[in-house]
């Protein structure tokens, strides 16, 4: 069925009639709905408990925060129309819009709702996985004793003040995360009910959700935003989010016109659709639009250099550097990913961050002769040394095989062991392995969110420094960056720390990811961004 060539929609989803709540549905009303699929599980529509991109997207149609990022990752006003930061960098004062209303109740959003939303996340009783966004940022002793007050205050109905324990320059970026979305207190007080009866201020409200099947959203007719011609947003009448787990099935439905948009590609799909340089094959150009942009995700092979592995060959710096030079990252992107991704040509911080001085971080270009020379200089006898074992999961086995073959050409023998994802994480956490496939996706778009992986304070098992890397100078730079408000100076410090970490060769960065979005040509206003955020308030369908 191809909706683009029909005067009205055919009701192809059996569940849709149930969602609408009637048997005789006027199919034409769905012509202006946006249809897409999410193959991952969605377990909640409460922003306090989201744990994945699929859930982030699902709640972001309903809720909004004080600020947001545009597609170029610049911070923009959202529920807050403007803000100020004190000279010491510790007090943030937000001035709220006065024309924002919650769904259903049509009650105006006020400052006390923001205070409630943030306190709810920070409260240990809520048990939100997002509580970390406030830990060590604000004074949380109010939850231990009544003599302390929560450091987020409503000065009046349109003013919110947040006091930090110490300056933390990435704080605004944290406030753009779904955990910090503003919720309706009356509804959220019933936490169990709220997970599938959410009430926010966003461009769409929830109509119906049948778990593991589909979600139906409808247009918020009281949404506060207008376009530059004075037309109230959103343009769409609603959203239909399907939850088919089989990506191939979902892709076929997209090709047949049953979905307006398709996100991401597995191996079979990319081979069918993309040339080796990452462009859309000629036969699809008229029908589809391809959006490809850097995605803040670093894919790597990590090496743990903790003293417990001191006798292992991977604790030899020259060998680690040889491994870096042995990998032809451009070949990996071309043949394993059909041109999707950016070969790692600098450090751990991925491409896509505005104003980050990537030129200050020197990477490891492919140089097989240099790799072989460094292997000789390492003086390692691979016949008697402990084996090098690349630990991975099945989804990334092809990358491990590629790396293994590249290392072999440089004279570095290795073995591959494949584990279930949860077991690999446990092995890494317990330091039972010292070479592993990993990735780091930005929680918020700031270089600090990547360089935290190299802080001494982040040593695993409690933190993300799985490499057990420590350099006093780099550590000082990273920690100092938290207190500096000048972005240029901050980024220079973080880039210098990135360079020091890169020189240690504890992390063999393979590539920086890119997000892939496909839409039909009739979809207008759909954009892409480095945090792979889906925003549909300005999207329309023009047949």
Image (tube, grey):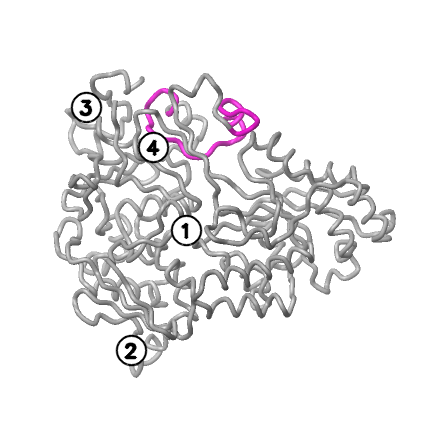
Q: N-terminal of the two: label 1 or label 2? A: 1
Query: What's the mark number on residue 36?
Result: 4
> Range of the magenta residues?
254-278
Q: Is residue 69 above or below residue 136?
A: above
Q: CA distance from mark 2 to mark 4?
A: 44 Å
| Residues marked 1 and 4 touching at CB (< 8 Å) | no
Residue depicted at x 59% and y 48% = 438
| Residues marked 1 and 2 touching at CB (< 8 Å) | no
Residue depicted at x 37% and y 25% = 254
Q: N-terminal of the two: label 2 or label 3? A: 3
Query: What's the mark number on residue 295?
Result: none
Q: Is residue 246 above or below residue 313?
A: above
Residue annotated with mark 3: 27
The secondary element bearing badge 2 is classed as: loop
Of the 4 image quadrants, the one containing the C terminus is: top left
**Depth check, front residue: 249 or 79:** 79
Query: What's the mark number on residue 51?
Result: 1
């Amino acid at each position: 069925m191809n909706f683009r060539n029909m005067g009205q929609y055919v009701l192809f989803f059996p569940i849709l009639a149930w969602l609408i709540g009637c048997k005789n549905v006027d199919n034409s009303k769905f012509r202006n709905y946006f249809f897409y699929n999410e193959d991952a599980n969605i377990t909640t529509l409460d922003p306090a408990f989201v744990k994945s991109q699929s859930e982030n997207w699902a709640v972001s149609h309903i809720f909004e925060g004080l600020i947001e990022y545009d597609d170029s990752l610049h911070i923009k006003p959202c529920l807050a129309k403007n803000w100020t930061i004190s000279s010491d960098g510790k007090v943030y004062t937000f001035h709220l819009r006065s024309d924002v209303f919650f769904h259903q109740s049509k009650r105006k959003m006020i400052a006390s709702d923001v205070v409630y939303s943030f306190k709810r996340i920070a409260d240990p009783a809520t048990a939100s996985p997002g509580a970390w966004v406030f830990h060590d940022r604000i004074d949380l002793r109010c939850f231990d004793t009544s003599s302390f007050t929560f450091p987020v205050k409503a000065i009046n109905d349109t003013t919110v003040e947040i006091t930090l324990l110490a300056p933390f320059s990435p704080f605004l970026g944290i406030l753009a995360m779904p955990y910090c979305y503003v919720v309706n207190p009356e509804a959220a007080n019933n936490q169990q009910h709220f997970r599938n009866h959410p009430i926010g201020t966003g461009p769409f409200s929830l109509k119906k959700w049948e778990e593991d099947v589909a979600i139906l959203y409808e247009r918020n007719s009281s949404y506060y935003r207008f376009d530059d011609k004075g037309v109230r947003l959103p343009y769409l009448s609603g959203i239909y989010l399907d939850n088919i787990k089989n990506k191939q099935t979902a892709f076929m439905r997209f090709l047949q016109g049953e979905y307006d948009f398709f996100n991401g590609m597995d191996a079979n799909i990319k081979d069918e659709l993309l040339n080796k340089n990452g462009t859309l094959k000629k036969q699809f150009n008229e029908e589809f639009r391809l959006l490809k942009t850097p995605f803040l995700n670093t894919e790597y092979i990590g090496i743990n250099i903790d003293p417990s592995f001191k006798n292992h060959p991977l604790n030899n710096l020259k060998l680690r550097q040889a491994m870096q030079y042995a990998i032809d990252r451009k070949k990996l992107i071309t043949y394993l990913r059909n041109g999707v991704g950016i070969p790692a040509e600098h450090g751990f911080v991925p491409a896509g961050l505005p104003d980050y001085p990537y030129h200050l971080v020197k990477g490891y270009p492919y140089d097989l002769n240099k790799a072989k020379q460094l292997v000789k200089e390492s003086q390692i006898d691979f016949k008697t040394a402990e084996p090098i074992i690349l630990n991975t999961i099945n989804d990334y086995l092809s990358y491990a095989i590629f790396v293994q073959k590249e290392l072999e050409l440089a004279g570095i023998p290795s073995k591959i062991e494949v584990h279930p994802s949860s077991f690999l994480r446990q092995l890494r956490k317990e330091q039972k392995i010292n070479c592993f496939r990993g990735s780091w996706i930005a929680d918020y778009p700031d270089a600090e969110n990547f360089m935290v992986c190299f802080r001494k304070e982040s040593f695993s098992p409690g933190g993300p420094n799985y490499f057990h890397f420590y350099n006093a100078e780099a550590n000082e730079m990273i920690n100092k960056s938290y207190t500096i408000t000048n972005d240029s100076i901050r980024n220079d410090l973080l880039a210098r720390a990135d360079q020091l970490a890169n020189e240690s060769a504890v992390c063999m960065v393979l590539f920086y990811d890119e997000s892939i979005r496909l839409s039909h040509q009739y979809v207008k206003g759909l954009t892409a961004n480095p945090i792979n955020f889906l925003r549909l308030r300005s999207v329309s369908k023009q047949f």
